[in-house]
Image (spheres, rainbow, N blue to C red):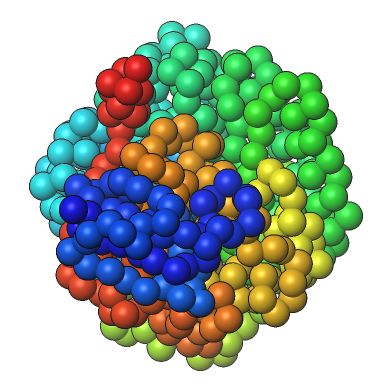
Amino acid sequence: MLELIIKNGFVFDGTGNPWTKTDVGVKDGRIQAIGDLKNIEAEAVYDATGLAVAPGFIDSHVHSDLNCTIPEVHKIKAMQGVTLEVFGQDGLSVAPVSNQTKPLWQKQLNGLDGDIGEWPWETIDEYFDFLRESKMIGNAVYLVPHGAIRTLVMGFDGRVPTKVEMERMRELVEEGMRQGAVGLSTGLVYPPNVYSNKEELIEICRGAAKYDGCFVVHIRNESMHDLEALDEVIDVARKSGVRLHISHFKVIGQRNREKFPLALKKMELARNEGIEVTFDQYPYTAASTVFQAILPPWMHDGGTLEMLERLKSPEMRKRIINDIETNTDYENWIFNCGMENIIIASVKSKENKILEGKNMLEVSKIRNQNPYEAAFDLLLEEQGAVTMVIHWGVEEDLLLGLCHPFQVVGSDGVFGGKPHPRLYGTFPRVLSEYVRKKKVLPLEKAIHQMTGAPAQIVRLKDRGLLKENYWADIVVFDPDTVEDQATYEHPLELPKGIFDVLINGKWVVKDGQYTGELPGQIITREEEGINITEKI
């Protein structure tokens, strides 16, 4: 007897194929049967007439690495159909650490990943054990973060490594892969990753390639030097043999729009050459990251504490302003987008909560300061724990990426305060705005970009598709009513039209409500390999 039969639905299997009118049977956490199941007994039967039945959505870029342990905060991911997330993004995450680097990363990541108190781990293995003990709503895989291994070897030093240091970092990547990571990540605009050169990237990527891991990268520049930054990481993939995945692909700033199709062409040429390259994208023309990213790279040498100390100096402030107004060699958010397009998303203190949702020109008026001084003082007052939303582009360019065969969906959602609406709305927005309303994507292709395609990138062997013997990660939604309701003004609105979500066969969302179930698993590379061996 099956535990559950979902019958009469339009079943999208995640491959990109059109729907099939069929039934799906679940037992022991897995899909046991697909087909005409009307004569099969089941403990429960769900009539999905008129509804879409799809694999659970995979969020290919998240910052849930700590908040996944707080169900009341993290449940929004399941509420929009997400059943698996890729942790460890941008080279900025929580393991591996040491007694010396842990306090630095707790400070550095406070605004991005949240604060859960003391971290009772150092290795990736120990972090995974912590997640298992904490229990999660959804599933997760992990990328070895470049920044974490770099600080273990050379701290937050703003310099290129020696050959010995590079080799040690590669060894740490290999160790992380053996402990279960599915790849390596970096964010080449964030300290300490920003100080690396191409030789360092090639060496550490060899450690990921050795275990068929992917290289997930926030490129060194997404604006004026976007094409050169893309060339850099394509060459890293060429010389290391690693699979390349570009994080939150975009070209920042109206003045740089002509580079968007050229960047897509570069990725296509790399594919033609035999380099496996893909990218993720969120369906919005605004970004979100830590507020300290407005500062030039030299300000981050030594980590957050030293950055905050420099901000106290009037001379340093003059140097920062000069860099922002004249230097285009780094990812210069203010130069490319303007203070009016930079909005404060979250702060820690009650005193500054009034600033959440305000752009920097509005912040400067509220504080009776010029925008630069307001920004610097805010960072000091909040000890760096500030996030921002930045409006960077136009929808016409967004659509070029959204319809591209290399694209998968990723939210890059950051929790806290008045966040970017992508945290609550990414997946239903694709289904509503771009499938149903604007008809730029067929439903089966959109579902593929949320399920089968990202599963392939991280080499999941039994998830991402509706297929017999695959894990029962399933979402049931109404394609005629599914809709994101989160906006920049009201970003905490739940989506509608997503009725039921199963994770590992457990009902996590039922009739649009979170059930309280915590069936999530940390999925490791070794476990995937064991599964393959057992099947063979």
Residue drawn at point x = 51 percent, y = 77 percent? 50
Q: Is residue 454 left or right of residue 56?
A: right
**Closest to the observer, 388 or 429:** 429
User: Measured along the vertical axis of the image, is residue 33 above or below residue 73?
Assistant: above
Q: Where is residue 71 in the image (x, y as percent from the top left)?
A: 22, 66
Q: Residue furthest front?
A: 39
Q: Residue at x 34, y 29 (%)?
A: 528
Tell me the quarter of the picture where residue 239 sits.
top right
The picture places residue 245, in percent across and down from the top left corner, at 59, 37
Residue 276: which quarter of the image?
top right
In the rendered structure, the answer to whether residue 158 lies left or right of residue 516 reads right
Front residue (pair 266, 286): 266
- Residue shown at the point (28%, 69%) measured from the top left: 45
Q: In which quarter of the image is residue 434?
A: bottom right
Between 81 and 6, the one nearer to me in the picture: 6
At a point 47% along the width and 36% down the height, the residue shown is 458
Q: Is residue 274 above or below residue 369?
A: above
Viewed as shown, does residue 51 lie left or right of 129?
right
Q: Please indicate whether residue 1 sits to the left or right of residue 343 in the image.
A: left
Can residue 133 be spotted in the picture? yes
The x, y position of residue 177, in whole percent, is: 36, 24
